[in-house]
């Protein structure tokens, strides 16, 4: 598989990446970068469309995904979803340079979101352009989505809710994989699954009293601390590929500065899960742990408010025997000269929506780097080009 056949030019790819990194795009502030992606595709005759995303109830968010489709010659052939998100975390103040510089040094391109995941976005865009020049039997659906880094993944959620994934047969998401894998791997790597996640929202209600006589009250803050400790030590399930689930208290708030025993407190607890740990199961597990504490406070176990009941990150695993995985493995060997490692993601993202909610065999293959979500974030430029070539080569094989 030669570079000429793949149609991926390194300079063009990295120039595109620099342009993307130089556009600030924290989640909920993606209008400029969505427009850039749209115009880049439109200038190349790739017929992009805006897909509007609206969430008025909790966030008041309005934004636009960008989607484009290549139609294959055989309606019976599979359809492949290529996905990347356009947003980043909020700009980190600790940067000692422009966080959107796109500076290149020693094969590393720096900037907020360079690795997570504008490197993957650039790779999937140039791969899509190269595939437009190919004679494909199946379709390719490119989706550049908003709000992956935000609280609900509204861009990917809207794709599923509005039926864009209904005719898809498999998905490639170009997130950085090895940096957040469950095991110690390096690129080239295929990430074939991810744990899921729920967020407990726990309300603790005690009884107020004068702070000088705490024995007359029930201190909700103290009991919330006991709940946090107990939940952090609770037994969780394990999976042969995804590893163990995990529990991590994130927030405890309650009380006041007045001289009163706190009568209420709130606790937010992260719960990463493996297959079998459903919403009902993890609620029952938490309620059992709290019951064993025999607290004087009342404790109500709930979950984070969400725009809809089905907005959650479910765990998933894609079989190593799936034809897309085999196509990606062959393409990886053809591009890099070595077989890829196989690993599994430790946290959650849009890939959970595709792999679990949409039921698509989903593979993460993306360029790696360091310092994601923090100052000094960078992506390896050679890996951006390699991923573009891998995606293009695998898509040609998978789609026929």
Image (spheres, helix red, strand yellow):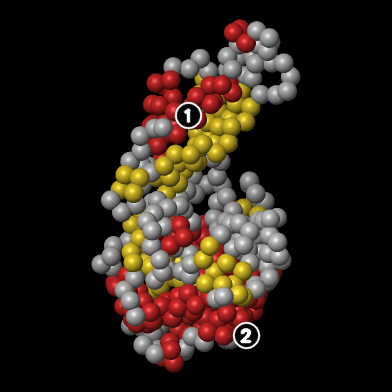
- Residue under the image location 55 percent in, 66 percent down: 115
**243 or 164: which is nearer to us?**
243
Residue receiving disc 1 = 229
- Residue under the image location 65 percent in, 72 percent down: 102
Residue 245 image position (x, y, % from top left): 38, 44
Residue 196 image position (x, y, % from top left): 42, 49
**110 or 126: which is nearer to us?**
110
Determine the secondary structure under disc 1: helix
Residue receiving disc 2 = 43
Q: Quadrant of residue 91?
A: bottom right
In the image, farthest residue toward the right: 258
Specify the label residue 85 is tagged with: none
**Left-right relation of 160 to 371:** left
Residue 45 image position (x, y, % from top left): 57, 86
- Give above or below for 2 relative to 296: below
Circle 2 Cα neighbour tier, 10 Å, few/some/many (<14 / 14–19 / ≥20): few
Which comes before the other along the chain, label 1 or label 2?
2
In this orientation, does residue 329 appear? yes
Q: CA distance from mark 1 to mark 2?
A: 56 Å
Q: Quadrant of residue 320?
A: bottom left
In the image, farthest residue toward the left: 321
**41 or 346: which is nearer to us?**
346
């Amino acid at each position: 598989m030669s570079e000429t056949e793949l149609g991926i030019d390194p300079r063009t790819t990295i120039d595109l990446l620099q342009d993307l990194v130089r556009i600030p795009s924290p989640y909920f502030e993606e209008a400029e970068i969505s427009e850039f992606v749209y115009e880049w595709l439109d200038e190349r005759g790739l017929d992009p469309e805006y897909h509007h995303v609206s969430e008025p109830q909790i966030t008041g968010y309005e934004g636009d995904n960008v989607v484009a489709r290549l139609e294959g010659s055989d309606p019976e052939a599979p359809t492949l979803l290529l996905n990347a998100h356009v947003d980043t975390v909020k700009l980190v103040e600790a940067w000692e340079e422009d966080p959107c510089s796109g500076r290149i040094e020693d094969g590393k391109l720096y900037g907020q979101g360079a690795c997570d995941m504008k490197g993957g976005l650039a790779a999937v865009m140039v791969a899509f352009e190269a595939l437009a020049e190919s004679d494909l039997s199946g379709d390719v659906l490119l989706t550049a989505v908003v709000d992956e880094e935000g609280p609900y993944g509204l861009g990917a959620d809207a794709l599923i809710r509005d039926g864009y994934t209904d005719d898809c047969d498999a998905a490639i998401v170009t997130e950085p994989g090895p940096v957040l894998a469950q095991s110690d791997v390096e690129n080239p790597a295929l990430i074939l699954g991810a744990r899921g996640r729920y967020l407990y929202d726990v309300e603790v209600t005690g009884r107020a009293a004068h702070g000088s006589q705490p024995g007359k009250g029930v201190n909700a803050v103290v009991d919330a601390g006991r709940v946090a400790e107990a939940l952090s030590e609770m037994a969780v399930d394990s999976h042969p590929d995804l590893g163990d689930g995990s529990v991590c208290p994130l927030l405890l708030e309650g009380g006041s500065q007045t001289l009163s025993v706190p009568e209420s407190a709130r606790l937010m607890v992260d719960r990463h899960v493996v297959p079998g740990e459903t919403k009902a199961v993890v609620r029952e597990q938490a309620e059992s742990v709290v019951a064993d504490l025999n607290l004087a406070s009342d404790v109500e176990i709930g979950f984070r408010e969400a725009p809809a009941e089905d907005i959650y990150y479910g765990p998933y695993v894609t079989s190593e025997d799936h034809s897309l995985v085999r196509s990606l493995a062959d393409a990886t060997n053809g591009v890099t000269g070595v077989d890829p490692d196989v690993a599994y993601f430790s946290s959650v993202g849009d890939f959970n929506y595709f792999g679990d909610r949409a039921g698509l065999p989903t593979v993460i293959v993306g360029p790696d780097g360091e310092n994601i979500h923090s100052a000094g974030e960078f992506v390896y430029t050679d890996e951006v080009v390699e991923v573009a070539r891998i995606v293009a080569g695998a898509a040609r094989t998978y789609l026929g």
